[in-house]
Structure formats: C-alpha cells, structure tokens
C-alpha cells in the first residue's frame, strides 16, 4: 500500500499536492480546524508512516525516522508515548450499508424489474421481511431500532399497508454526521491510495480513470450531469447484484484466513468556470 519504490521528485510533486489539498483545506477552515491542529496531525502521520516503513526493513530507530521526516527526535519520542489513534467503523454504517445493499441486490428482496420490494415488518420464516433483512446482517441490533433510525433519516417510509418502502437506493447519511465522515474518509482515502500507487509504480495496478468536459454550455452540463448520475447509480446497483450473487455462491472466507477487500467508487463534480481568455 505504501510502496514508493519509484516516487516522483519533490519539486514535481508539491504543486499538484497543493492543488489537491485546496478543497480539504477549505473544508478545514470552514469547520474551524486551525493550521496548528493540522500541523500536529501531519507531524504524527509522518512519524507513524516512517516508522512503519522502517519496521518493514527491520529497522527501528528514532534517528532514522528523524532523517526521513525532518521531525526532531524529542518530538518523535513524545508522539510515540502518545500512541496511535485508531478509528472504529460506526455500527450504523455497517448495518445500514449492508442491509440496503442486500435489499437492492438480492432477488428475494427485489421485484421483476429489479427494484427493491416493499417489505412487511415481520413475516413467517422463509418469507422476505424487514426483520429478516436486518437479521441477515446482524443480530446485535433489534430490527425495530433500525426501522426507527431509518424512518428518522428518511431512508424508508411506511405505506398504507404498513409495509416498509425504501426511498433511496443508496445510503445517504445526514450532512456532517459520523456516518458521512466515515464514507468521506473511506472513499477519498482509497481513491488517493490508488492514484498514489499508480504514480509510484511503473505498471499502474489500479483502475483510476475520469471522463471530463470543459467549457460546456450550462444547459448541456446539467443534462450530462443527470445522465451520468443515473448511469453511475445503475452500474453500482448491477455490480452489487453480481457481487452478492457470487458471495452467496462461494460463501464468506473462513475465520482466520487471508482476506482481501475491493472498493469501486464513482464520483461526479461540476462547477462554474471563469471566463475564457479573450472572452468579451
């Protein structure tokens, strides 16, 4: 993941990194995160990653870490004593994302057109229900608690017959919530990891492509945005169905065995451009 056997030269990397960081720095400023706080975070990450790199080479030396990072050895000792902060996946993320993925992807929960079916809250064993859907993901959280949370988020509604109807075909957390920040981290981290690995290695191992058009009339840009949004959503739904079918056929990896994770992400962004040079 951190193999930088052929990294680019620093002078060639800093300008692209500055452009890359502009949206993130703007978010930090708007959120009240000052530069000293960010600097302390970056100092900690530099020390942690340099230590991991050296440990793979069988070396554990504060002097070597200091040489790689430019951080003073006294600071390195302080950061070691402080320990590394680990982040946990919010429980609601695991339950909600997996349950919705199964609702839109498994044939017993979808209709003939592939749309998620309204589900009764409970039903006899063997008949699809909301209770069975939640139980297929976890037994640690009561289905009623999940239903109440989803109703409050607007993910589902109850129809005239009391069935649970999925309103959104994807998990869209509330802005600024713990769940949204989790996906903010996961999605951008994996995208950046793929792009960084492709830069550092002669044979790009990861898919990292984009389709973009500039200087479009606003009406055409809006039409393309709507088309691409629908196409991306449909692609993810179909690939989710295929992945779930494969997983159902093969079963999960045995406990303690080697595993591997795979992440496919898409994004869509649009913004107004400054006038072209020479424009009236």
Image (cartoon, rainbow, N blue to C red):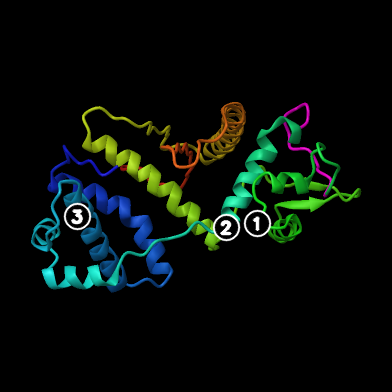
- Contact between labelled residues 2 and 1, with CB atoms less than 8 Å apart: yes
Dominant secondary structure, magenta: loop
Compared to residue 96, the image places residue 106 above or below, namely above
The numbered dot on residue 140 is 1
Query: Residue at position x 55%, y 58% from top?
Result: 179
Instruction: Give how far apart the Cα atoms at labels 1 and 2 are.
Output: 10 Å
- Counting every numbered tag in the picture gives 3
Residue 191 is situated, as x and y percent measured from the top left of the image, at: 39, 43
Please report the bounds of the magenta region as a residue range.
Answer: 110-121
User: Image height check: is 199 above or below 141?
Assistant: above
Vertical comparison of 41 with 275: above or below: below
- Residue 69 within the segment the image draws in magenta: no
Closer mark to the observer between disc 1 and disc 2: 1
Measured as percent of width and height from the top left, residue 229 is found at: 57, 38
Residue in the image at 74% along x and 54% along y:
143
| Residue, disc 2 | 91
Residue density around tag 3, few if under 14, some if 14–19, many if 20 or more, within 10 Å: some
Q: Quadrant of residue 225?
A: top right
Q: CA distance from mark 3 to mark 2?
A: 31 Å
SS category of the residue bearing label 3:
helix
Q: Earlier in the sequence, mark 3 or mark 2?
A: 3
Whole-angstrom CA distance, mark 1 to mark 3, is 39 Å
Nearest the eye: 26 or 124? 124
Which of the two marks, 1 or 3, is nearer to us in this view?
Answer: 1
Q: Is residue 140 left or right of residue 130?
A: left
């Amino acid at each position: 993941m951190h193999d930088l056997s052929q990294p680019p030269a620093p002078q060639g990397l800093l300008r692209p990194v500055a452009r890359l960081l502009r949206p993130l720095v703007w978010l930090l400023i708007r959120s009240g995160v000052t530069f000293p706080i960010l600097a302390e975070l970056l100092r900690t990450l530099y020390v942690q990653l340099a230590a991991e790199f050296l440990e793979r080479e069988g070396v554990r030396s504060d002097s070597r870490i200091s040489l790689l990072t430019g951080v003073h050895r006294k600071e390195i000792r302080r950061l070691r004593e402080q320990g590394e902060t680990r982040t946990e996946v919010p429980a609601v993320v695991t339950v909600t994302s997996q349950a919705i993925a199964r609702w839109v992807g498994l044939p017993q929960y979808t209709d003939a057109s592939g749309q998620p079916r309204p589900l009764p809250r409970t039903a006899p064993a063997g008949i699809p229900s909301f209770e069975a859907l939640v139980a297929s993901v976890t037994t640690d959280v009561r289905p009623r608690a999940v239903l109440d949370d989803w109703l409050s988020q607007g993910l589902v509604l109850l129809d005239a017959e009391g069935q649970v109807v999925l309103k959104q075909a994807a998990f869209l957390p509330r802005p600024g919530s713990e769940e949204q920040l989790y996906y903010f981290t996961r999605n951008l981290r994996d995208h950046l990891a793929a792009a960084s690995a492709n830069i550092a290695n002669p044979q790009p191992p990861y898919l990292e492509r984009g389709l973009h058009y500039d200087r479009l009339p606003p009406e055409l840009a809006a039409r393309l945005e709507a088309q691409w949004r629908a196409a991306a959503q449909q692609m993810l739904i179909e690939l989710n169905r295929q992945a779930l079918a494969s997983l159902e056929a093969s079963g999960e990896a045995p406990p303690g065995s080697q595993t591997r994770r795979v992440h496919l992400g898409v994004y869509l962004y649009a913004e107004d451009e400054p006038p072209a040079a020479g424009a009236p």
